[in-house]
Image (cartoon, helix red, strand yellow):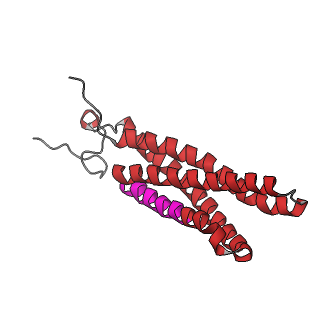
Amino acid sequence: MQQRLSASGRPSGTDGYDFSYRMVVDSRYQKVARTKSILRSFFLVQAITLLLGLVLLIFQSASEGLASRVLEISTTACGIISLKIGELGRKRSRVNMLRFFMVASSIAVSLLMFCAIRKCSGFMAAKSPSFWETILELPEVALAVVGLVFHLFIIGYTVHLIANMSVPKRAS
């Protein structure tokens, strides 16, 4: 094979003549990169939401007693752990870790919503709450709703990421 002479000190092969031999990046790899960056920001928001909820639960359980909040605290901790697994799966492109994350975090978010709804309905039915008691319970419900909304986005983008990371099926 004859090597081209380099023009103006430029290394050979970079003059554009090899364009027809260059590889084109498949669009699904671009989609994977874009979805990974979006998921990173959603994971960060979800982690902040879960950590704020955990701190709020620990402060509230200090006044009420830890026994009444064990399910909520342990579920929040499991949500944080599953989020870390999801982040590792996102970084390393591990489909099985992402699937485990989707199942574990869905269970954690469902239990947290159940606890928030149960507490609100029990709180409203048991007594007529004062204004300050209602204000103190509002952040917990707001964090649960924000966590649920972001979780729905995370699940959608994770499914999209898994679909683009998988090997495309060939038609026979």
Instruction: Indicate left or right for 163 with 21 as reference.
Output: right
Seen at 61% across and 56% down, the residue is 112
Foreground residue among 16 and 162:
162
Task: State the extent of the magenta-drawn residues as a range.
Answer: 77-92
Q: Main secondary structure of the magenta part?
A: helix
Seen at 66% across and 54% down, the residue is 144
| Residue 99 percent location from the top left of the image | 40, 49
| Residue 33 percent location from the top left of the image | 43, 47
Residue 96 sits above or below residue 79 on the image: above
Instruction: Indicate left or right for 105 with 117 as reference.
Output: left
Foreground residue among 43 and 83:
83
Seen at 29% across and 35% down, the residue is 19
Q: Is residue 88 magenta?
A: yes
Instruction: Indicate left or right for 36 with 61 as reference.
Output: left
State the quadrant of the C terminus.
top left
Q: Quadrant of residue 168?
A: top left
Foreground residue among 122 and 51:
122
Label total for image: 0
Q: Is residue 120 magenta?
A: no
Q: Quadrant of residue 4?
A: top left
Q: Is residue 94 among what the camera can see? A: no
Q: Is residue 119 among what the camera can see? A: yes
Seen at 84% across and 63% down, the residue is 133
Q: Residue furthest top?
A: 172
